Image (tube, rainbow, N blue to C red):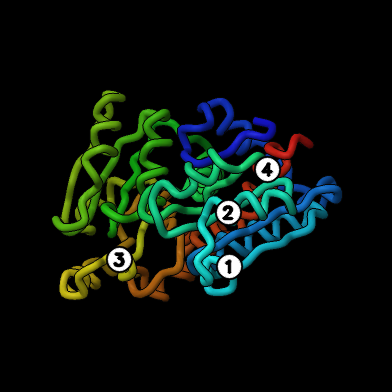
């Protein structure tokens, strides 16, 4: 994996993905290791981010790397009309690896093709978010003790949710049963469902969240993303489709854990936070360990 870009979760094999999870486990036990002191990490975030950007920067800092970059396109030369190609080629002169979030689908793949160094996709539009996928896999394995033969319920925005797309594809390697809960307007894209079918796996589609709760090992809640809707009226129709409340978990499995890529709006009530099944804040912390593993591996020190 040394000096390889990570644009899609499929860029790494199943064995390579597991290796990242194993290394992340080592970093969880010992997160402060000054093994990247000779490296510079560039974080280029062309759209807003809190958890992904800060967890990458925290991961790099805990490993001793220097961090450069920007947190919005307004604070870069893109606001002056600079092309993505020119930005990538310039920043690659100043850094050893680029972590990039961009609102356009395919932008990360393009950046990886023009950059002389490795590029990590931190989210490209509604396409993919492979580092989130790896931390989600880490969280699932940590809470369930395995990745195989689980019932995973994806809830909310399955159409535009890049975290859902990446994770659905990754979990198809582990004999997953999918429970897809969404409004009809926000169903999982056909290409992802086709991928599931090609793996001879089963998916079930629902509109009622309560129907799924007793069957699930993992409930993966997602926010209805206002920024992905070109028509505000369409967003208004679906924005409050689901709200998971603590009393709805009475008949849930003992091992159930609730994940969310965050930020949440109102799709998980705050009364769920104190339930032992709520795992989304620990999930966010797990992102630091996984991103430490990715940086260390791609830069060739692990």
Within-10-Å neighbours for mark 2: few <14, some 14–19, many 20+: some
Instruction: Tell me if label 2 and label 4 are in contact, CB under 8 Å.
Output: no
Q: Of label 4 and label 1, which has the lower sequence position?
A: 1
Disc number lying in front (2 or 3):
2
Within-10-Å neighbours for mark 3: few <14, some 14–19, many 20+: many
Within-10-Å neighbours for mark 4: few <14, some 14–19, many 20+: many
Disc 4: which residue: 293
Q: Position of residue 60 (x, y in %)?
A: 73, 55
- In this view of the protein, which residue sits in the foreground, 127 or 248? 127
Mark 4 residue element = helix
Disc 2: which residue: 86
Q: Position of residue 181 (x, y in %)?
A: 23, 53
Q: Which mark is residue 77?
A: 1
- In this view of the protein, which residue sits in the foreground, 301 or 247? 301
As drawn, 5 above or below 282: above
Total numbered badges shown on the rendered structure = 4
Q: Which mark is residue 224?
A: 3
């Amino acid at each position: 994996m040394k000096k390889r870009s990570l644009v899609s979760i499929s860029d790494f094999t199943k064995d390579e993905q597991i290796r990242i999870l194993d290394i992340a486990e080592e970093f969880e036990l010992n997160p402060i290791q000054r093994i990247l002191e000779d490296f510079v990490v560039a974080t280029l975030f062309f759209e807003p981010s809190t958890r992904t950007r800060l967890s990458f920067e925290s991961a790099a800092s805990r490993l001793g790397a220097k961090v450069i970059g920007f947190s919005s396109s307004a604070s870069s030369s893109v606001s002056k009309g600079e092309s993505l190609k020119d930005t990538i080629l310039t920043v690659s002169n100043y850094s050893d690896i680029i972590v990039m979030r961009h609102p356009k689908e395919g932008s990360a793949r393009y950046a990886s093709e023009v950059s002389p160094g490795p590029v990590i996709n931190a989210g490209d539009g509604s396409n993919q978010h492979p580092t989130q996928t790896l931390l989600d896999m880490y969280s699932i394995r940590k809470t369930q003790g395995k990745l195989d033969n689980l019932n995973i319920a994806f809830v909310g925005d399955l159409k535009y949710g890049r975290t859902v797309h990446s994770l659905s594809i990754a979990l198809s390697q582990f004999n997953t049963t999918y429970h897809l809960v969404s409004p009809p307007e926000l169903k999982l894209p056909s290409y992802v469902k086709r991928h599931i079918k090609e793996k001879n796996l089963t998916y079930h589609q629902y509109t009622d969240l309560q129907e799924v709760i007793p069957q699930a090992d993992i409930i993966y809640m997602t926010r209805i993303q206002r920024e992905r809707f070109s028509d505000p009226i369409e967003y208004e129709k679906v924005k409050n489709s689901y709200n998971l409340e603590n009393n709805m978990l009475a008949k849930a499995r003992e091992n159930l854990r609730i994940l969310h890529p965050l930020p949440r709006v109102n799709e998980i009530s705050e009364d769920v936070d104190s339930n032992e099944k709520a795992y989304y804040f620990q999930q966010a912390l797990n992102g630091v360990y996984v991103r430490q593993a990715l940086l260390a591996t791609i830069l060739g020190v692990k």
